[in-house]
Amino acid sequence: MVHLFNAGPAKVPDTVLKQVQSEFLNFAGTGISIVEISHRSPEFTALLNESNANMREILEIPDNYQILWLAGGASGLFASLPLNLISSKDDVVDYIVTGTWSKNAAKEAENYTNVNYVVPIPSDFTGVPLDESMNFTSGAKYVYYCDNETVNGIEFPHTLKTDGTIICDMSSNFLTRPIEVSKYGAIFAGVQKNVAPAGLAVLIIRDDLISTERLHPVPKVWDFKLQAAGNSCVNTPNVFSMYVTNLVLKHLMENGGLKRFCELSTQKSSILYNVIDNSNGFYSCKIEKDSRSRMNVTFNLTTKELEAEFVKKAADVKIEGVKGHRSVGGIRASLYNAVSLDSVNFLADFMKSFQKDHE
Ligand SMILES: *Cc1c(COP(=O)(O)O)cnc(C)c1O
């Protein structure tokens, strides 16, 4: 058995994988595989409607929000959000940059509108900024932030405090804690971190933000208004990923819902942070304590050589996916919903014995 800590694509629950396998040649009794079926067939439409209903139930999404399923991943939304929301060349948007992904999103938005950086971009990312340090623009079209920075291992402990319209990238902590959707204008996520195979993004957006009054032309496949009217099937969607997403939604609901998975995520990440904090500096995590991610635990060893050895020795005992992102190095263990407590304990034990052998 492999203990998989991939950052994305990432672990999918074993029970879901087995169900996919058992139904693969025969979707919903049609005798047709899910990868062959028409996205306009009644069986697929039923699946999509069920998935929307499940998403609404699990996140308690109010009626005045739409759920859109879009191509282009989360990165596609870095462009399509400003394209859909900007209506005048004088518009200003506020971005809070706390790591790699929010930085990329802000750079992309600069192509389409005037971006105000709510806090200066730090040279090194070590936590979320203090509320008092944020310099919001009054009348900003929206305020953008990333709830969990996957590369850096930084997570907002709570919803951003602002009167502005919040747009939030939840790609890597989507469905890992209960949230109050009505506090946000829009929430989006690439599904490959916590949910399903890559190539699909979900956008939950308040009705009044879906407008046709736009400064720039919007590609049809990214036109929120068209996609809302067309049940996210303006063109051929990622049928397979939508199908797995629905299975994972059902799996979450059958296993205690978001409250339970939130407790588990705190428990799992605390196990690793405790090992780090009790290692007398053998392991170190540079992220400030109240910004530490429950999803992506990032840490360093004292030298690059030792880090390479750690990754190698981990693979020997079938711990996979712990090499840090290529842009920052170090070690990263991603603890999404599908990663079991057993796997996390196994990694913690490995870390302790690796320390003993290399001190
Ligand atoms: C992975 C990730 C993205 C990019 O996702 P793609 O689907 O590959 O475009 C964006 N934001 C966050 C927080 C991520 O973790």
Image (tube, rainbow, N blue to C red):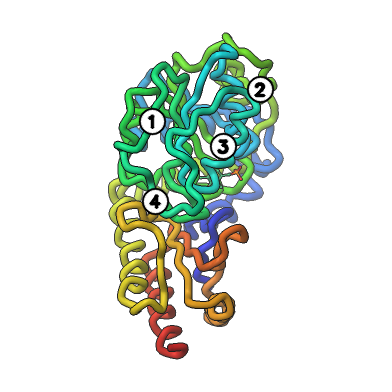
Task: Name which of mark 2 and mark 3 comes first in the sequence.
Answer: 3
Which residue corresponds to mark 4? 127
Quadrant of the image occupied by residue 277: bottom left
Name the front one of labels 1 and 4: 1
Instruction: Provide residue 358's location: percent of width, then percent of height.
Output: 47, 88
Task: Identify the mark nearer the N-term, 1 or 2.
Answer: 1
Q: Nearer the viewer, residue 28 or 239?
A: 239
Where in the figure is residue 73, as x and y percent of width and height? 61, 39
Residue type, mark 2 in image: Val
- For label 2, the residue is 234
Whichever of labels 1 and 4 marks the residue nearer the N terminus, that label is 4
Residue 305 in the figure: left or right of residue 176: right
Asked if ligand 1 lies within 8 A of label 3, the reply is: yes
- At label 1, the amino acid type is Asn
- Whether disc 4's CB lies below 8 Å from ligand 1 is answered no
Label 2's element? Answer: loop
Q: Compute the Cα span from label 1 to label 4.
A: 17 Å
- At mark 1, the secondary structure is loop
